[in-house]
Amino acid sequence: MPFRKICVLGLGYIGLPTASTFATHGLDVIGVDVNRHVVDVLRNGGVHIHEPGLRTLVQAAFHSGKLTVRETPVAADAFIIAVPTPIREDKRADMKAVTSAAESIVPFLRKGNLVVLESTSPPLTTQQLVAPILERSGLKVGDDVHLAYSPERVLPGKILSEIIENARVIGGVTPESAEAGRDLYNVFVRGDIILTDSTSAEMVKLMENTFRDVNIAIANEFANLAEMFGVNVWEAITTANLHPRVTILRPGPGVGGHCISVDPWFLVEAAPDDTPLIRQARRVNDGQPARVVARLEAQTGDLAGKRIAALGLAYKPDVDDLRESPAIHVVSELLQRGAKVRTYEPFALETKIGAAVPAPTLEEAMQDADALLLLVNHTPFLELDPAVVARYMQGELVMDTRGVWEPDAWMAAGLTLIRLGDGRQYA
Ligand code: SAJ
């Protein structure tokens, strides 16, 4: 099935790279975003997202004349929905954006069109939410219009290569819909394309991220046990991972990002009585920020009035993405206990968390601090010289929640390093 013109709804972390990649591979792409600011920024040559290589790709797409952006859809051969599916307070998926994106294409649907949902969604969304909306057009999904679910599985920080190289699952509401999806993504995907039904494709996506969440939860629980038993969890994990069938992940201050900390809830929502493990893993990971603060407080005593330098706010290294970031929860908890927090996030310098003061430089964040807290293992932090840190700080306590700093070097600089999951004493 030949596709010449496509409409991509949602120009965020997934939609923008997807739209631009299709455009640089020769399709006419209309990128649609309901947020006027996003459309304006892109039209003026900017990019509203930090992702390595994205600016260059978007510029190439515009220069090719194949990408245009606007606030409403137009008629096209295919429509890709890549809008957010955030989680609500009650831990249920907020499907408003998917609903309104699907509704917005109804007036433009024509016989033979393909619609692909990429947004991570609870099982059965494609069949039970999207299909009925599309049928308001009078066309029959599966007969007149193809409909498929194809999850994005790219890793933030590596989106541009993974979007092309990763295996891609395409689940159709009919086999023909899946095949139509394959014809579309074949334009640029170099990884394997696996065809299945739409609900299986939805499950695959949720299973991948839930698997990772549960595995991080057990690493976090091991870290907590290690502190209790006087064990260095980082060494213990390295040793355990020498076993040919064991791969324990890394403990940390919690799990953030818009995917792994959110997607498992979609399974819990769909089957609350049959997901005890998934729910518990979420609780363990969500409990990590409080554990970090408790460990720090055990060293410093009452946190009220203590000057804490918090390094890193993003949800993981070398990205500016703050969504669901556990570092933010740690900072909020410190503030609640009366600590005076200075934050330094090199990828989003102006980020302000409550009463915390965002420092423009690392040095200003560390100046006169009673304690230094590493929350994200951004590359620049890995190279920090403990002797330099010691010169800026007033106190001696340094806490590493990512297991990346070596105690010896910090001790040699006269500082006390404690590490999450490390129950050994280095005095
Ligand atoms: N984390 C740990 N310990 C680890 C690994 C990660 O604490 O050993 C934490 C990170 O610090 C971060 C969170 O988990 O806060 C998630 O980071 P991540 O790098 O594991 O994953 P994401 O959220 O950036 O991207 C994931 C990926 N999914 C899987 O690896 C199964 C990616 O392939 C998906 O496309 C993406 O979710 C998504 O969009 O769903």
Image (cartoon, rainbow, N blue to C red):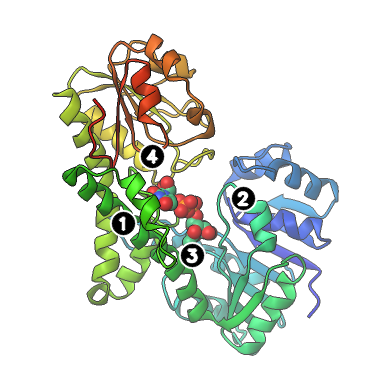
Estimate how packed mark 2 is, as few (under 14), some (14 to 19) or many (20 or more) residues with alpha carbons within 10 Å: few
Q: Is residue 32 visible?
A: no
Residue denoted by label 4: 402
* Distance of label 2 from label 1 (alpha carbons): 24 Å
Q: Residue drawn at (70%, 77%), measured in percent from left and top?
A: 182
Residue denoted by label 2: 158
- The answer to which of marks 2 and 4 sits earlier in the sequence is 2
Q: Tell me, for residue 217, which label it has, or none.
A: 1
Q: Amino acid at mark 4?
A: Arg
In the rendered view, tell whether residue 354 sits above or below residue 413. Answer: below
Contact, CB < 8 Å: mark 2 with mark 4? no
Q: Tell me, for residue 93, which label it has, or none.
A: none
Q: Residue drawn at (42%, 58%), measured in percent from left and top?
A: 242
Can you tell which of label 2 and label 4 is closer to the viewer? 4
Q: How many marks?
A: 4
- The answer to which of marks 2 and 1 sits earlier in the sequence is 2
Contact, CB < 8 Å: mark 4 with mark 1? no
Residue 120 point in image, percent of width and height = 48, 65
Residue denoted by label 3: 120
Quarter where residue 108 is shown = bottom right
Q: Which sits in the foreground, 31 or 399? A: 399
Can you tell which of label 2 and label 3 is closer to the viewer? 2
Can you tell which of label 3 and label 4 is closer to the viewer? 4
Quarter where residue 28 is shown = bottom right
